Every structure is written in structure tokens, then in C-alpha cells.
Amino acid sequence: MIWLDLPKGFSVSRHMRKVVPIANQFLIYKDRLMSEGLMKDMVAVIAEQRRCGNIACLRTKLLAVLPLPGEPASKNALLRLGMFLLEHDVALKSGKFFSDWNGSPTVWVAALVDDVFRDLSIPSGFKARYKMRVVALTGPPAGLILDTCLSIRYAAYLPKMVGVPARTGKEVLPTDAIGMVFFAQFGSTPGRPFTMLEVQASNSMKIMNKQLFNRRHP
């Protein structure tokens, strides 16, 4: 699905109920270290189960989704695989080689925050001091982990943008965004490289994120 405008009616829970059964088909690979042999085996199984018409295309695309050689095929990695296969099911079955999305057109995706951390490689005095990694749940980059840089102020306020009450009596940290979900607009604009351009959260997302925050800070 390609969302050029902010979507309406999307449910993260409903979407994940489609992703999980696909990911579960590959639990036999859970925690095994990625290797050339394992990749070939996974490609063969996926091609047969998903009726992919172009194995070369499938293998090429999986290189961006699956862990690097020597890294484990974790539960989260298999979920990302499920997101990719669900999103590109029709294209893979068609047998046509489809191009990677390169930031154009600008699209909205449902995203889950994988990590937020201080980027110590950026000297003090520079505006961007945090890095955030999000998993694209939908859209052309589905299953990919996308990086974006955040200013200290933006990183600190992000949890409140997506569901944490603005006047909570609890301390809110940038890392509280980890595990939260929202809509993110990604793309390239004149003078700016590929990056996250905007964040919005639906009411259901804000409820989920608020509940996550409250579980962490009882």
C-alpha cells in the first residue's frame, strides 16, 4: 500500500494479526545465524510458500530485510520478514522485478520505534543529537529499519506528540518512545536527504502508546 496522504482507519493491531501468521511460518529459522546456506534455504521455502515468480528478485529484496551474515534471525527479524512479504505479496507473485523505493514519492508509513539513543558521534553544539530507528510496518519500505536524526528538543517531546499526556507528573524521556507506534512521513525534499519529515498518531495509536508509557511508569 502506498499512502501519499495521511491514512484513515488503519489499525496496527489488525495489521499485525496479518503479519504474525506469515512470520510464524518461519519459526524454524528463529535464532539461527544468517549464512549463505540459510539464505538459500529461506529463499527456496518462501518462493514455494508464497508462490513467488522471480527468485532472483526475492533474494535481492530479502538482503535488505533479513539480518546480516553472522547475525541471528530473531523473532523481530522474522516479524519484519512477515511485514515485507505481506506488503509485496502481489509484486513478488507477479514475477516482475520491482525497483527499490528511494524516497520518492514521499510516503506515509505506519512505524514502530525500535530504538532511540544519543548519537555520540555528533559533536556538541550541533542541533541533531539523537538517532531514532523505526521499523516500517507498511508501505514500500515495509520490514526495513529506517534511521533518522532528532534534535534534543524533538526527541524529548516526541513521546508526548504520540500519546503521553502533556501534563503527566512523571518524567518523560526520549527513550520512552521505544515501542511506540505512529504514522511517519518519509521522503526526500529539496536540500534535505532521505529522512523522516513528519509524525502523526491516530487516536488508537495514542491510546496504545499511553498504555505502554503507563506500564513502564506505574
Image: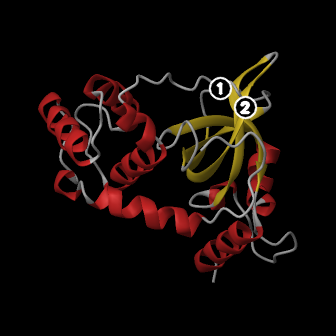
Crowd class of label 1 (few under 14; some 14 to 19; many from 20; radius 10 Å)? some
Say which of 100 and 172 sits in front: 100
Q: Residue at x 78, y 27 (%)?
A: 126
Say which of 66 and 106 sits in front: 106
Q: Residue at x 71, y 71 (%)?
A: 204
Quick one: which residue is furthest to the bottom in this view? 218
Whether the residues at callouts 2 and 1 have beta carbons within 8 Å, the answer is yes
Circle 1 — which element? loop
- Residue 53 position, x and y percent, is 29, 32
Q: Is residue 217 left or right of residue 192?
A: left
Disc tally is: 2
Residue marked by disc 2: 106
- Residue 77 position, x and y percent, is 36, 48
- Residue 13 position, x and y percent, is 55, 69
Tell me the amino acid under the disc marked 1: Gly
From this view, report whether residue 36 is shown above or below residue 218: above
Find the distance from the CA under tag 2 to the CA under tag 1: 6 Å
Q: Residue at x 59, y 44 (%)?
A: 1
Q: Quadrant of residue 147?
A: top right
Q: Is residue 182 left or right of residue 154?
A: left
Residue marked by disc 1: 103
- Residue 121 position, x and y percent, is 60, 27
Q: Is residue 42 left or right of residue 76?
A: left
